[in-house]
């Protein structure tokens, strides 16, 4: 019986990222040992990159002198789209295994590049209302001086229509959620709010999923706590490298713009109750029957 080709969702990409997305689809093939950090933008990617990198490299680098003290998490875990857009495919190919790679591409656009490879995927999602607020602030910080500020009400309407980088958010999140249900041994689906509430159990879960669980000795020595401290919002935000306004061709975001508040529920400071209700209703409708609550 002929099988139906998996459907591909429609998604918005910033002009600067689109060539990278196309190049990944054409040229990238995952290795079995690859670990992917995948997310909708502004859902906690920077934090998850830091945690995954610190956990994976903890025996190579003593935590007191870990690269995360002098490098931004996005320099430790590359976002493939920009490197592919810049034609730097060889940089990714030259990386020794196991690689940790990242992209904001929806699963259906990445599927052909990773299918059958056996690679592992970690994804993080976040309350849609907080994602919107975080995105609006980030967009504002990245905005060239000659471009007017987008009023929050306008950003809200666009977001509700799915118009934002990697949007619409709902299909993006749902695809990874469904894949995590299909292949829980290979796809770990996390929620930002739950990570904030129980960082310790999440760090342990991450390490187990990544195939490098903490030993009893490490737990007794406080290695998990040390990793969480190193990757905490306060610690990372106050490092010199992360206070920098610099941006380069690969990292288009100024590092300081990646650390804003790091709170759960900042949407209450930006949205009217009607706006919140509208976004919650859309989300419930989109996620209905999926079993996913955000
Ligand atoms: P806010 O804008 O709500 O503060 P991403 O990394 O996907 O771009 O997501 C950015 C959001 O994650 C921002 O949220 C940012 O402050 C928050 N963040 C960055 N580093 C964090 C950390 N170590 N712990 C918790 N939240 C963090």
Image (cartoon, rainbow, N blue to C red):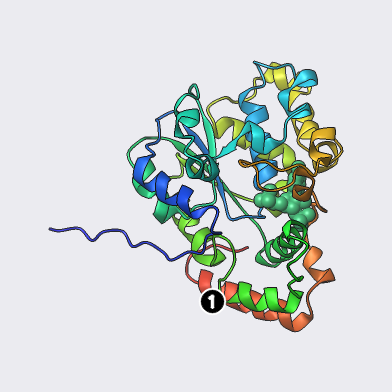
Q: Quadrant of the N terminus?
A: bottom left
Q: Secondary structure at mark 1?
A: helix
Number of labels in the image equals 1
Asked if 56 appears above or below 267 in the picture, the reply is above
Foreground residue among 55 and 75 = 75
Foreground residue among 122 and 67 = 67
Asked if 249 appears above or below 15 in the picture, the reply is above
At label 1, counting other C-alpha atoms closer than 10 Å, the crowd grade (few under 14, some 14-19, many 20 or more) is few
Q: Quadrant of the C terminus?
A: bottom right
Asked if 58 appears above or below 148 in the picture, the reply is above
Is residue 292 shown to the viewer in this render? yes
Is residue 197 shown to the viewer in this render? no
> Residue 262 appears at what percent x and percent y?
79, 51
> Residue 252 appears at what percent x and percent y?
66, 47
Q: Residue at the left extreme?
A: 1
> Residue 72 appears at what percent x and percent y?
72, 35
Q: Kindly identify which residue carries mark 1.
A: 285
């Amino acid at each position: 019986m002929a099988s139906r080709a998996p459907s591909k969702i429609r998604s918005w990409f910033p002009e600067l990222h689109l060539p990278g997305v196309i190049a990944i689809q054409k040229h990238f093939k995952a290795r079995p040992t690859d670990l992917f950090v995948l997310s909708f933008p502004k859902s906690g990617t920077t934090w998850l990159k830091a945690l995954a990198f610190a956990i994976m490299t903890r025996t190579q680098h003593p935590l007191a002198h870990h690269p995360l003290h002098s490098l931004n998490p996005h320099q430790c875990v590359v976002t493939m789209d920009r490197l592919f857009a810049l034609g730097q495919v060889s940089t990714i190919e030259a990386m020794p295994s196991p690689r940790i790679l990242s992209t904001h591409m929806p699963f259906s656009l990445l599927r052909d590049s990773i299918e059958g490879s056996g690679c592992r995927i970690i994804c993080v999602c976040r309350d849609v209302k907080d994602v919107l607020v975080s995105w609006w602030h980030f967009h504002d910080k990245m905005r060239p001086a000659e471009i007017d500020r987008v009023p929050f009400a306008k950003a809200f309407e666009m977001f509700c229509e799915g118009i934002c980088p990697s949007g619409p958010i709902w299909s993006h999140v749902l695809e990874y959620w469904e894949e995590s249900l299909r292949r829980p041994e290979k796809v770990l689906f996390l929620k930002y709010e739950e990570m904030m509430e129980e960082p310790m159990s999440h760090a342990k879960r991450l390490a187990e999923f990544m195939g490098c669980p903490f030993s009893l000795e490490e737990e007794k020595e406080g290695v998990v706590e040390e990793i969480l401290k190193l990757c905490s919002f306060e610690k990372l935000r106050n490092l010199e490298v992360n206070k920098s306004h610099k941006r380069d061709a690969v990292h288009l975001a100024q590092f300081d713009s990646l650390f804003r508040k790091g709170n759960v529920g900042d949407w209450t400071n930006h949205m009217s109750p009607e706006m919140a209700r509208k976004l919650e209703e859309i989300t419930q409708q989109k996620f209905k029957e999926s079993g996913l609550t955000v």
